[in-house]
Image (tube, helix red, strand yellow):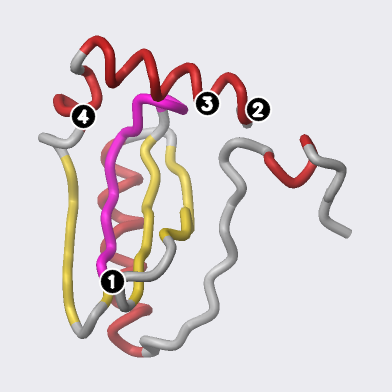
Amino acid sequence: MSDPLSGMLGMMRSLATGSFEKSRKDIFRDEFDGVIVDTVCTPDTGKWETGIQRDKGNWVIAQQYKTRDLAKQGHDEWVRRLRENPKLEIEDVDVWNINSFFGEDED
């Protein structure tokens, strides 16, 4: 897991070098009923992750994966689960470790 500063620097580096736009070319994305399920290998962490947005609200990073194949399987599973239960509660995986960085470790 990354710390927030490393994540921010990685994202800034990807924007400066153009790698952010390149990373958005290999994605899995589904949109339905106000829900967006978006899975991509992000330049800030270098890992595949599924982000979910509902009704144009905040993005929640629901899961990370080590490989593209696992990311595709995970993406499809999130789409299935959200189609079955659009109100499904989703916990953010805290990819930049913000909770512990600011002293808010999970119980």
The image shows residue 78, relative to residue 42, as above or below, that is below
How far is disc 1 from disc 2 in space, using C-alphas? 29 Å
Q: Write the residue at 83% across / 50% down.
A: 104
The image shows residue 7, relative to residue 54, as above or below, that is above
* Earlier residue among tags 1 and 2: 2
* Earlier residue among tags 1 and 3: 3
Residue at which label 3 appears: 7
Question: Which label sits on residue 23?
Answer: 4
* Earlier residue among tags 4 and 2: 2
Along the line of sight, which residue is nearer the eye, 70 or 35? 35
* Earlier residue among tags 1 and 4: 4
Other-residue count near label 2 (Cα within 10 Å), few / some / many at <14 / 14–19 / ≥20: some
Image quadrant holding the N terminus, namely: top right
Tell which tag, 1 or 4, sits nearer the viewer: 4
How far is disc 2 from disc 3 in space, using C-alphas? 6 Å
**Decide: marks 2, 3 in contact (CB < 8 A)?**
yes
The image shows residue 99, relative to residue 84, as above or below, that is above
